[in-house]
Amino acid sequence: MGATHFLTRTLDRVSTEMSLHVLAYNLKRVMKIIGIADLKAAMQA
């Protein structure tokens, strides 16, 4: 998604930043696979 380096320092903060990158990547995949409307419905249930 265009990120080539971490914006934070220390292992804890880098770990958090990496987790956010992975979460965003997975959400984008889910939106493409099942669609945004179905994702919204699943999140509200």
Image (cartoon, helix red, strand yellow):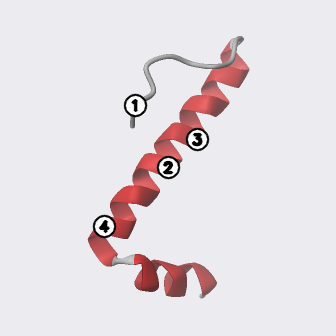
Given the image, on which type of amino acid does mark 3 rest?
Answer: Leu
What secondary structure is marked by label 3?
Answer: helix
**Label 2 neighbour load within 10 Å: few <14, some 14-19, many 20+:** few
Q: Identify the residue at the far front of this view.
A: 2
Given the image, on which type of amino acid does mark 1 rest?
Answer: Gly
Residue at horizontal 44%, vertical 85%?
A: 37
User: For this rendering, which residue is in front, 45 or 25?
Assistant: 25
What secondary structure is marked by label 4?
Answer: helix
- Up/down of 41 relative to 9, above or below: below
Tell me residue 9's x, y (percent).
Answer: 70, 12
Left or right? Give the position of 8 relative to 31: right
Circle nearer the viewer, 1 or 4: 1
Residue 20 image-quadrant placement: top right
Left or right? Give the position of 7 relative to 10: left
**Label 2 belongs to which residue?**
24
The reply to whether discs 2 and 3 touch (Cβ–Cβ < 8 Å) is yes
**Label 1 belongs to which residue?**
2
**Label 3 neighbour load within 10 Å: few <14, some 14-19, many 20+:** few
Given the image, on which type of amino acid does mark 2 rest?
Answer: Ala
**Label 4 belongs to which residue?**
32
Name the mark on residue 20.
3
Tell me residue 42's x, y (percent).
Answer: 51, 83
